[in-house]
Every structure is written in structure tokens, then in C-alpha cells.
């Protein structure tokens, strides 16, 4: 039987230096007047919020700023944002910042529309239907949240990150202006950039679409590898290889910043249709327990998961090595595949991603519990090309520890 796959994105994508100047026109086209802007205090202090608000106000829109965004936002914070948006009577929600702020904006729009708390939407396809218009402007180059169907929150009670996935969460408009990333600190540039690489590699090496093991009666936004996902993932990997280290070293380099903005968005288009896999499942309990950034956690774990998946994805890994700039001429496919993992390990060191779980405060006694929690994230584990067990996952954690 032929593969059957679908592709979803943001309703409109506007990309390029200076694109933020068009924001007022773009939001006005949504036929709304009251805009709730989700951001954080760091972007307020850096003047980024003012720059984004200017075209909105020039277009005659009423803007309410919520600057309570924080890294890895909690479910509790989502309720605070919802209350503020409800009091303002928001007609559209703008997410400005990294993935955390954009995800918080998505959840706020969903809760405001459907009158339910964020917790009601956790899982796959639990949002009942369309939500208030969402507009996203990334200030980092990593999550791709400006085009994805996902929002990630932290459940403090269980010390676990939880995902909300629904195509109704895809923004109506994504404005990707690389100039907004110029104020991004080196560590955030590194963490978010390795996150984009993780998205692209997991999409490129996912389970094949025709083998995607979705249980009867379940719904999901993910569907496994397909040709369009491969095209996007390849381009994203290549762009990261050419631009990430340079963007970390030279933060004012607009060419490198533009390359990374494109990489993150393109990787977002790939993984939000194909899926993310074992790296993400393993990062959720780690990030929830030790509060490492999502990108740094993913980047730390990525090569260890690649070694685990290597037996089933040699051809794809060999291509990844080339995309990351490694000369594989004359190598066997197996040697070239291993070269891809070494390229990722080298990039990690070059941009300062922690090498081991112990380096970010993980205790050896936590690993078995992490493995049990990760094994329960079935919605993304089924995207992984190699089947897992709690014992296998714990083994990877131990290799990474």
C-alpha cells in the first residue's frame, strides 16, 4: 500500500530581517482589536518588547503585555496567564520569545477559547477545536514553536515535563525576524541551536511512515518519516552545521543568525509532522527534576541516543555526517554513520553543551526513576526507529551519566 501522510504548518510564515515591521498589518488582517502579548522581563529590559509593540500600536491595536514568562513554564503559570488574558478580554494571543513564551501563548489561547485549564489538554489531540488566533515571534533559534502543534509545560507535582499536541495550536501567523535573535546570549544560542539539531535528526531518523505504530482508536499529530519531512530535516541539519558554532562565537553575525533562524523553523516544520522520539522522552524527566534547559538536556542526550539507534539508521546517519560537513569519501556506510555521531559530539563540546548528566546535577540514584518515567511517554517513543524497554532506556542514561 502507498504511504498516506499529511503536512501542517502555521497559517502564514513571514521570514527575514526586519519582518517584525509588518506585524501590525499581519495582526490587523486577523480582524482582531485586543492583543494579549506573552513575553518575559528579560525581553522587556532588552527593548525587544517595545520594538514588537510599536507596529501593533501603530495599527491601532490595543495591547496588554504579560511579562511573566519563564524558562520551562509550569502548569501553574499557565493559569496565571489565562486569568490575565481573560481579564483583558483578549481577541488574539502573541507569543514573543523562546519556545517557553510561545508555548505559554498557545496554551493561553486554548484555555481562553475552550474554558478549560491547561491540564485538560495534556496529551495528543485533546484540544477540542480551533482557538483564538495565535501569532508567534521567536527570539531564539531552537524550538520551532512558531510553526509547531506542540506546547510543553512543567508539572511541578510530578517533576515531569508534559506535552500538549494539537494542530489547533499551530499559529495563524509566524513572524521569524533574525534581528530579534541578536540579543540572545551565547548560552541560550547554544542550547536552542542544539535543540533545533535534535529536532531535525529525530525527524530524519524516525520510524518510517508506513510502519508508524499508532494503536487503533488513538489520534496523534505525528506520523513517522515521509519524503517532505526528509527534505526539510536535511536542510535544517545542514544549516545548523554551517551556522550554529558561528552564531555562538559571533553573536552579532546576522548571516549566522539568519541561518539558525531558518534552521529552527525548518526543523520545526519537519518534526511537528514527523515526530520527535527517544531523546525528548528521556529529556522530560531530566529537565523536570534538575531544571536544565530543554535544549541543553536534548543536546546532552542526543549522541547517546544516536548510538542506540545506529543499527537501524546507518544510511541516514551517514548522510547526516555529510550534512554536518564531514568528509566521508571512501568510508564504509557504518564508518560514515559513526562519523555523524562524532560530529554531534564535537559540536556539543565546541558550543559548551554539558557532556554528562552528572555535570547538570543528576544523581546516579535517579536514573531508574527517569527511565520508568521516560518509558511512559508513549506518544513520542513510538516515533523512535528502535523499540525501547525501561532497561534499555536506563542503560542509555547510564552511558550518559
Image: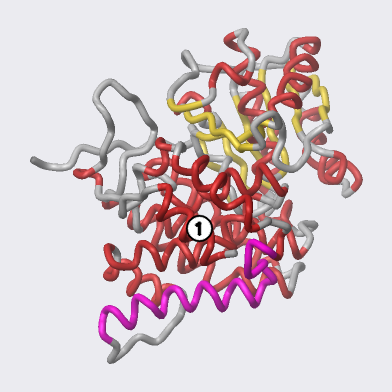
**Residue closest to the eye, 81 or 280:** 280
- Determine the main secondary structure of the stretch shown in magenta: helix
> Residue at label 1?
198
Residue farthest left in this picture: 1
Looking at the rendered image, the quarter that the N terminus falls into is top left
**Residue closest to the eye, 327 or 379:** 379
Name the spot of residue 321 as percent of width and height, x first: 40, 76
| Residue in the image at 42% along x and 65% along y | 306
Residue farthest right in this picture: 45
Image-quadrant location for residue 167: top left
Residue farthest front in this picture: 365
Judge the density around disc 1: few (<14), some (14-19), many (≥20) Cα neighbours within 10 Å: many
333 inside magenta stretch: yes
Looking at the rendered image, the quarter that the C terminus falls into is bottom right
250 inside magenta stretch: no
Name the spot of residue 394 as percent of width and height, x first: 48, 54
Element on which disc 1 rests = helix
**Residue closest to the eye, 183 or 373:** 373
| Image: 109 above or below 365 | above
| Image: 188 above or below 20 | below
**Residue closest to the eye, 207 or 369:** 369
Name the spot of residue 235 as percent of width and height, x first: 42, 62
| Residue in the image at 72% along x and 38% along y | 96
Magenta range: 332-358
Name the spot of residue 328 as percent of width and height, x first: 35, 85
Image-quadrant location for residue 361: bottom right
Q: Is residue 38 left or right of residue 116?
A: right
Amino acid at each position: 500500500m502507498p504511504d498516506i501522510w499529511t503536512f501542517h504548518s502555521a497559517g502564514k510564515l513571514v521570514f527575514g530581517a526586519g519582518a517584525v515591521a509588518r506585524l501590525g498589518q499581519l495582526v490587523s488582517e486577523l480582524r482582531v482589536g485586543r492583543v494579549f502579548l506573552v513575553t518575559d522581563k528579560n525581553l522587556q529590559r532588552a527593548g525587544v518588547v517595545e520594538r514588537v509593540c510599536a507596529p501593533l500600536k501603530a495599527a491601532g491595536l490595543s495591547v496588554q503585555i504579560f511579562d511573566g514568562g519563564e524558562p520551562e513554564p509550569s502548569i501553574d503559570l499557565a493559569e496565571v496567564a489565562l486569568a490575565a488574558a481573560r481579564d483583558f478580554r483578549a481577541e488574539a494571543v502573541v507569543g514573543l520569545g523562546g519556545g517557553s513564551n510561545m508555548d505559554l501563548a498557545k496554551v493561553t489561547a486554548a484555555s481562553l477559547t475552550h474554558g478549560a485549564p491547561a491540564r485538560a489538554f495534556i496529551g495528543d489531540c485533546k484540544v477540542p477545536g480551533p482557538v483564538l488566533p495565535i501569532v508567534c515571534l521567536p527570539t531564539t533559534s531552537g524550538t520551532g514553536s512558531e510553526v509547531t502543534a506542540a506546547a510543553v509545560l512543567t508539572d511541578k507535582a510530578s517533576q515531569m515535563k508534559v506535552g500538549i499536541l494539537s494542530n489547533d495550536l499551530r499559529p495563524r501567523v509566524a513572524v521569524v525576524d533574525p534581528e530579534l535573535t541578536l540579543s540572545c546570549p551565547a548560552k541560550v544560542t547554544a542550547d536552542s541551536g542544539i535543540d533545533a539539531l535534535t529536532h531535525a535528526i529525530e525527524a530524519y531518523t524516525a520510524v518510517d511512515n508506513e510502519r508508524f505504530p499508532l494503536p487503533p482508536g488513538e489520534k496523534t499529530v505525528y506520523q513517522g518519516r515521509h519524503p517532505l519531512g526528509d527534505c526539510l530535516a536535511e536542510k535544517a541539519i545542514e544549516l545548523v552545521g554551517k551556522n550554529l558554532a558561528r552564531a555562538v562565537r559571533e553573536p552579532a553575525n546576522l548571516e549566522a543568525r539568519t541561518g539558525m533562524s531558518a534552521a529552527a523553523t525548518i526543523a520545526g516544520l519537519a518534526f511537528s509532522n514527523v515526530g520527535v522520539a527517544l531523546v525528548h522522552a528521556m529529556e522530560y524527566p531530566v529537565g523536570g527534576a534538575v531544571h536544565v534547559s530543554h535544549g541543553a538536556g536534548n543536546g546532552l542526550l542526543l549522541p547517546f541516543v544516536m548510538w542506540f539507534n545506529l543499527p537501524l539508521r546507518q544510511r541516514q546517519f551517514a548522510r547526516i555526517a555529510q550534512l554536518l560537513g564531514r568528509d566521508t569519501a571512501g568510508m564504509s556506510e557504518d564508518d560514515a554513520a559513526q562519523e555523524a555521531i562524532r560530529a554531534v559530539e564535537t559540536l556539543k563540546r565546541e558550543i559548551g553543551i554539558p557532556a554528562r548528566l552528572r555535570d547538570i546535577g543528576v544523581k546516579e540514584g535517579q536514573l531508574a526513576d527517569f527511565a520508568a518515567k521516560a518509558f511512559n511517554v508513549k506518544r513520542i517513543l513510538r516515533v523512535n526507529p528502535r523499540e525501547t524497554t525501561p532497561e534499555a532506556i536506563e542503560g542509555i542514561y547510564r552511558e550518559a551519566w
